[in-house]
Image: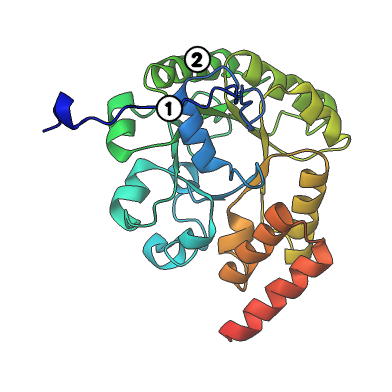
Amino acid sequence: MADKDGMKLAKDYGLDVPQANQSFYVKGMDHVDWGMKDRLSRIFRPDTGKTVMLAFDHGYMMGATAGLERMDLSIEPLAPYADALMATRGALRSCIQPIHNKPVILRASAGSTVLKDDMSHEVTAVDIDDAVRINASCLAVQVFIGANGECQSLNNLLKTIDSGARLGIPTLGVTAVGKEMARTTRYFMLATRVLAELGSHIVKTYYCDDFEKVVAACPVPIVVAGGKKVTEMEALELTYKSIQAGAAGVDMGRNVFQSDSPVGMIKAINGVVHSGLTPIQAYDLYETEKSAQA
């Protein structure tokens, strides 16, 4: 135990060095609490300010998606190369080892499956206490701007933002695109801005024409969804264009785990997002990794 007789006189107060006012590097997050900044800094790499999220939450509405039949086999090898894992609590607890030390973006809304025409009537699917038990770094809520369930999904978002904020957990607002929603610049500018204005700390959306305008009008980081499986070069070009337009990262799922070389693909995406590789350079990396694994 320390005692007063053993204490040394403190003398290095750095009187000639004023304490710096440090600006937090994640867009729009200067004024959130320390714990939330800590969680955001786990999602967005401090050295680049960007993120590569690995999404495998598709089963909550699509069932056993191709490439995710056995998540313990398909996702475990990919986890070390992702900056964050976007998943449901069921998938995490049953299939993913808690040893990767990756931030979890927890799917916190749920609703109808792909068997229904109108999937916009989602509900809040995760209690905040369970999110804490899982050690979630972020909560993800899908919002259906322009659909029949728009108001209900916005209510889900607001409740999640409020419950997460009480514990320093940020919320990712996801712009859903259903059959009745046009993938236009005008739509995405509206949807992303609404989600940010209502308190989302991150917004996930789709790439579109004039995407730099969508990014500029959104006061929080935008992460671009990978969407349906396309060729590897097309996915790398999408990643490159998104980053060049100002996106803070990508959230890739099917374009990784449905690839002929999932590890090679996620490494190539990392190269574009964090190392500034062009699509051609990243594709060469993908081919090299694919050949090495053959």
Asked whether 119 or 215 is in front, the reply is 215
Residue 20 in view, yes or no: yes
At a point 60% along the width and 18% down the height, the residue shown is 148
At a point 23% along the width and 30% down the height, the residue shown is 7
Secondary structure of the residue carrying tag 2 is: helix
Give the left or right position of residue 6, taking residue 278 as reference.
left
Name the amino acid type tagged 1. Gly
Residue under pointer 1: 35
Asked whether 48 or 233 is in front, the reply is 48
Q: From the top left corner, tell me how far across and down residue 163 is, in percent.
A: 39, 17
Name the amino acid type tagged 2. Leu
Q: From the top left corner, tell me how far across and down residue 93 is, in percent.
A: 29, 49
Answer yes or no: do the residues labelled 2 and 1 have beta carbons within 8 Å? no
Look at the picture and state if 140 lies above or below 149.
below
Neighbours of disc 1 within 10 Å: few (<14), some (14-19), many (20+): some
Residue under pointer 2: 158
